[in-house]
């Protein structure tokens, strides 16, 4: 019954920041894994960051130090703070969730996700 809705995308200049939000319609069953992904031009999705129901987070090397995942448990909202944005960060960004499990390693976590948002567009200009 979980539905996810992303928001917060938009257009920024290089070096700027955005905070993406992922709102879940209901509390996600515990344990769980929530992740942020982005899509390349070939339609492949890359895992950027994950956070589990214990608050443990993990990051792809490509965004570590620039992006931060967090959550507001009471509001069922998950965030991706993106700083020092670069033109190649221009992508569709998605959140996804898997209930009743902890996060798999970053290399394989996408395959475990069962609930996906429709995405939000991020555009970064030079």
Image: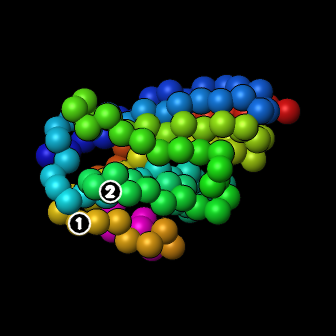
Which quarter of the rendered picture does the C terminus lie within?
A: top right
> How far apart are labels 1 and 2 at the CA level?
9 Å
Q: Is residue 32 magenta?
A: no
Q: Which residue is mark 1?
A: 101
Q: Nearer the viewer, residue 82 or 118?
A: 82
* Circle 1 or circle 2, nearest the eye: 2
The label shown at residue 37 is: none
Query: Which residue is drawn at the image coordinates 67% and 26% (left, top)?
Result: 11
Instruction: Return the x and y of residue 54 as percentages of the image width and height.
Output: 28, 55
Query: Which residue is drawn at the image coordinates 65% and 45% (left, top)?
Result: 66
Instruction: Return the x and y of residue 43 as percentages of the image width and height.
Output: 57, 58
- Asked which secondary structure carries label 2, the reply is strand
Image quadrant in which you'd find residue 15? top right
Q: Which residue is mark 2?
A: 52
Q: How crowded is the residue under tag 2: few (<14 C-alpha within 10 Å), some, or many (20+)?
A: many
Can residue 96 be seen at all in this image of the molecule? yes
Q: Is residue 89 above or below residue 30?
A: above
Query: Which residue is drawn at the image coordinates 31% and 40% (left, top)?
Result: 4
Q: How crowded is the residue under tag 1: few (<14 C-alpha within 10 Å), some, or many (20+)?
A: some
Q: In the image, which residues are magenta?
A: 108-114
Q: Nearer the viewer, residue 119 or 67?
A: 67
Q: Nearer the viewer, residue 18 or 119?
A: 18
Instruction: Return the x and y of residue 34 as percentages of the image width and height.
Output: 35, 52
Instruction: Return the x and y of residue 2 as percentages of the image width and height.
Output: 20, 45
- Asked which secondary structure carries label 1, the reply is loop
Image quadrant in which you'd find residue 60? bottom right
Can residue 120 be seen at all in this image of the molecule? no
Q: Is residue 31 above or below residue 119?
A: below
Horizontal side of residue 91 vs 111, given as left or right: right
């Amino acid at each position: 019954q979980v539905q996810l809705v992303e928001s917060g995308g938009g257009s920024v200049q290089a070096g700027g920041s955005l905070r993406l939000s992922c709102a879940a319609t209901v509390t996600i069953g515990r344990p769980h894994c929530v992740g942020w992904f982005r899509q390349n031009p070939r339609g492949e999705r890359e895992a950027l960051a994950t956070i589990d129901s214990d608050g443990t987070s993990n990051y792809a090397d490509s965004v570590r130090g620039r992006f931060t995942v967090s959550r507001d448990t009471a509001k069922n909202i998950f965030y991706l703070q993106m700083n020092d944005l670069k033109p190649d960060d221009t992508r569709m960004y998605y959140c996804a969730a898997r209930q009743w499990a902890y996060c798999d390693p970053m290399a394989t976590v996408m395959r475990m996700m069962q609930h996906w948002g429709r995405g939000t567009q991020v555009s970064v200009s030079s």
